[in-house]
Every structure is written in structure tokens, then in C-alpha cells.
Amino acid sequence: MENNQSLDPRVNRLQLSASGEPVVVQDGENWNVFEVFHQEKRGAHHEHVGCVHAPNAQLALVFAKEQFARRKKCFNLWVVRSADILAFSAEDEDMFANNLDKTYRDASGFKVMEKINRFKKSGKE
């Protein structure tokens, strides 16, 4: 096996060779990246605060607690495996284009004030 001179301990641990042979990774050897979302108080939004590497979700939650909830106020944490997060690609940006002409939201077409004034003048208050 050839030494890869990598600073990444995962590369050295797997002992990758230059021959291109497939590497078999056993369960528990390959840690996943989990995104961490932090909730400061009850009812607040969860905010993305970073990521942790862990072999499973339960340990990711423990690592997230130690990393992101130990020193600052925390009510709740979420951890989500990064590979499970789906997102649109940049080519799909036209899908989010908005119609800026939203006159249908204005109440200017309603003549309510005239009806209110007629009602007041009629004495049926």
C-alpha cells in the first residue's frame, strides 16, 4: 500500500491505494456529516449553526449538544444527515420567480367607505 500523504485521517485509515482497487468500508467506519439546527428558546425558529461528523444520528445529537449547546442557551437541537437534505439546483431559479404585479391584494377596488358613510347618515348606528 502506498502512503497518500494526506492530512485527512479518514484517508490514512482507509489505506487507499493508487491501483484503483475498490475499498470496502465496514459499518461504523464511515462517519456521516450531520447538519445541526439550534433553537434558543421555546417557540423560536431553529437556525442552522454548523455540522458534526458522527456514525449515526443518536451520536450526532450527542456531539451537537457538546459542540453547539454547551456554552450558550439552548432549548432544542435538530440533526439531519446532510445526504438526506434535498434542494433545487441553480438552474431551477425560474421556478421561484414572482409576479411583482399583485394589485389583487390591494383593497383599493372596494368602495366600503361609501357604504359606511351612507349607513351612518341613515341613523342606524
Image: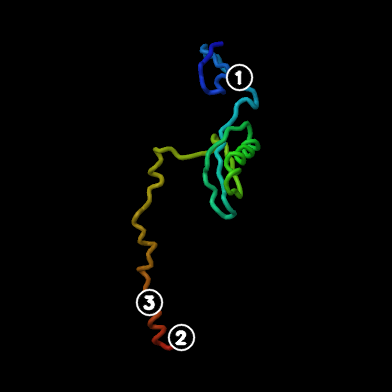
Residue type at tag 1:
Val
Camera-side residue of 56 and 98? 56
Q: Residue furthest front?
A: 71
Q: Nearer the viewer, mark 3 or mark 1?
A: 1
Crowding at mark 3 (Cα within 10 Å: few <14, some 14-19, many 20+): few
Residue 68: x %, y % from top left: 57, 42
Q: Earlier in the sequence, mark 3 or mark 2?
A: 3
Q: Residue at x 41, y 87 (%)?
A: 122
Q: Nearer the viewer, mark 2 or mark 1?
A: 1
Residue type at tag 2:
Glu
Secondary element at tag 1:
loop
Residue that label 3 marks: 113
Crowding at mark 2 (Cα within 10 Å: few <14, some 14-19, many 20+): few
Q: Residue at x 56, y 23 (%)?
A: 9
Q: For the N terminus, which image quadrant?
A: top right
Q: CA distance from mark 3 to mark 1?
A: 76 Å
In this rendering, position of residue 98 left or right of residue 20: left
Residue 3: x %, y % from top left: 53, 13
Q: Residue at x 58, y 44 (%)?
A: 71
Crowding at mark 1 (Cα within 10 Å: few <14, some 14-19, many 20+): few
Residue that label 2 marks: 125
Residue that label 1 marks: 24
Q: Earlier in the sequence, mark 2 or mark 1?
A: 1
Q: CA distance from mark 2 to mark 1?
A: 83 Å
Question: Vertical placement of 42 versus 85: above or below?
Answer: below
In this rendering, position of residue 68 left or right of residue 108: right
Residue 60: x %, y % from top left: 62, 36
Q: Earlier in the sequence, mark 3 or mark 1?
A: 1
